[in-house]
Image: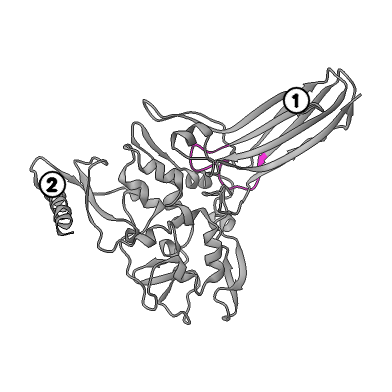
Amino acid sequence: MKKKLYTISLVFMGVVLLQFTNCNNPKTKIHPLTKSWEIAVPNQEIPEGLSSLSAKQCGACHTKHYEEWKLSTHAHAWTDLQFQAELKKESSPFMCINCHIPLQNQQEYIVEGLIDGDIYKPVKKPNPHFDQNLQQEGINCASCHVRNNAVIGTKGSTNAPHKTVKDADFLSEKLCISCHNANAVITPTLACSFETGDEWKSGPYFGKKNCISCHMESVDREIVPGFGVKPSHYHYFAGSGIPKLSTVETKILNGLAVYPSKLERFYSKMDTINYTLKVINEFAGHRLPTGDPERFFNSKFTIKNENDSVLLSKTERIGEHWEWYPEAKKMADNNLDPMEERKFTFSYHALEKGRLKLSVVITKHRLNKESADYNGLDENYPLFITVFDEEYIIDVK
């Protein structure tokens, strides 16, 4: 055991010495962190009256909020298998974790600067306040509600067992956009393209509705059981609805409105069967899809005969196309702007008599199967959800 500890100590001393040598090399220049996504929320002290920054402790009193948070993708921001696969890549820089575990308390190292400004050469030191259990909670209650030894709320409270500060401006959409608008070319082959905040600012709902209006709906309820009904917000952070694990349920807030055309039940042989599907970004204040550029919608039309053989199939895609190598660049983009509509038409020429089945399915995807396989994600990792599914019976006489 002593020999093992001695070996670990030598390795640690070697790392420290190497960093010291690099930092004190006259030819080496340490660049400070200047971009918002390069910097974690500084280590936070536990507010008086609490014993932990964990969401689980918050849930002891704020039971509804905690149960809702557990169904959110925020709760799985760190444990997400896709994110963990990305982290293991050599091209993954240190700052990616700052949105997935925002608190410095959740991070094993403190980054103090960049050697010669190189994002792949961070100057790191061990974080004495690192809490591995807290890390597993991803974006938890404290990520948004704890600063400067106090719990921040929108209303304030004199009855709380912990210090509470009222600051509705801090808990506004500004906080959401600090992560949901990370847009930068990090390296030639690495781009962060999350533009939801900019999309909202340039859209029709700016100044009328914000992130909280839609994704944290207002509700009157007991914030703590037994202390009376007060104005509150749901904490599902309803979004794509695609869960991070097959065993986890999430809430969907579907911005896409779907208007299918009507079909006659009976057609004559040699008739052309026409079907139109109209989709509108009717409810979202940003583009659809938004966020990760790998997200997309598929609208699939399939017509089968009575033997269940496919006679004709067609898929329409809404989303971005990127080329990642040798340089990251967007090749195409047909995302829907707020209130934009698009029509897809499916036609089939009936050559035979008999019964036909037309299925129309719209799916919302996190990423495609090829990318999932590349990242080593198995069938237990949900890639999509179904947002519209209709089947029509057609008799051709």
Judging by the rendered image, the residue that carries numbered circle 1 is: 309
Kindly identify which numbered label has been placed on residue 244: none
Question: In the rendered view, would you say 62 is above or below 351?
Answer: below
Q: In the rendered view, does 144 fall on the left or right side of 349?
A: left
Pointer 1 local density, CA inside 10 Å: few below 14, some 14–19, many at least 20: few
Q: Nearer the viewer, residue 217 or 125?
A: 125
x, y (%) of residue 226? 58, 81
Residue drawn where x is 55% and y is 73% of the image: 223
Amino acid type, residue under disc 1 in the picture:
Ser
Q: In the rendered view, does 350 fall on the left or right side of 47?
A: right
x, y (%) of residue 32? 22, 49
Contact flag, marks 2 and 1 (Cβ < 8 Å): no
Residue drawn where x is 57% and y is 63% of the image: 234
Pointer 2 local density, CA inside 10 Å: few below 14, some 14–19, many at least 20: few
Q: Which residues are magenta?
A: 280-296
Q: Work out which residue is located at the far left of the displayed protein and give it.
A: 26
Judging by the rendered image, the residue that carries numbered circle 2 is: 18
Q: Is residue 183 visible?
A: no
Q: In the rendered view, does 218 fall on the left or right side of 118?
A: right
Residue 3 part of the magenta segment: no
x, y (%) of residue 117? 22, 41
Q: Which quarter shows the N terminus?
A: bottom left
| Mark pair 2, 1: CA separation | 66 Å
Q: Nearer the viewer, residue 121 or 2?
A: 2
Question: In the rendered view, would you say 333 is above or below 24?
Answer: above
Q: Quadrant of residue 64?
A: bottom right
Q: Nearer the viewer, residue 2 or 54?
A: 2
Question: In the rendered view, would you say 62 is above or below 388?
Answer: below
Element assignment for label 1: loop
Residue drawn where x is 36% and y is 51% of the image: 98
Amino acid type, residue under disc 2 in the picture:
Leu
- Which of the two discs, 2 and 1, sits closer to the camera? 1
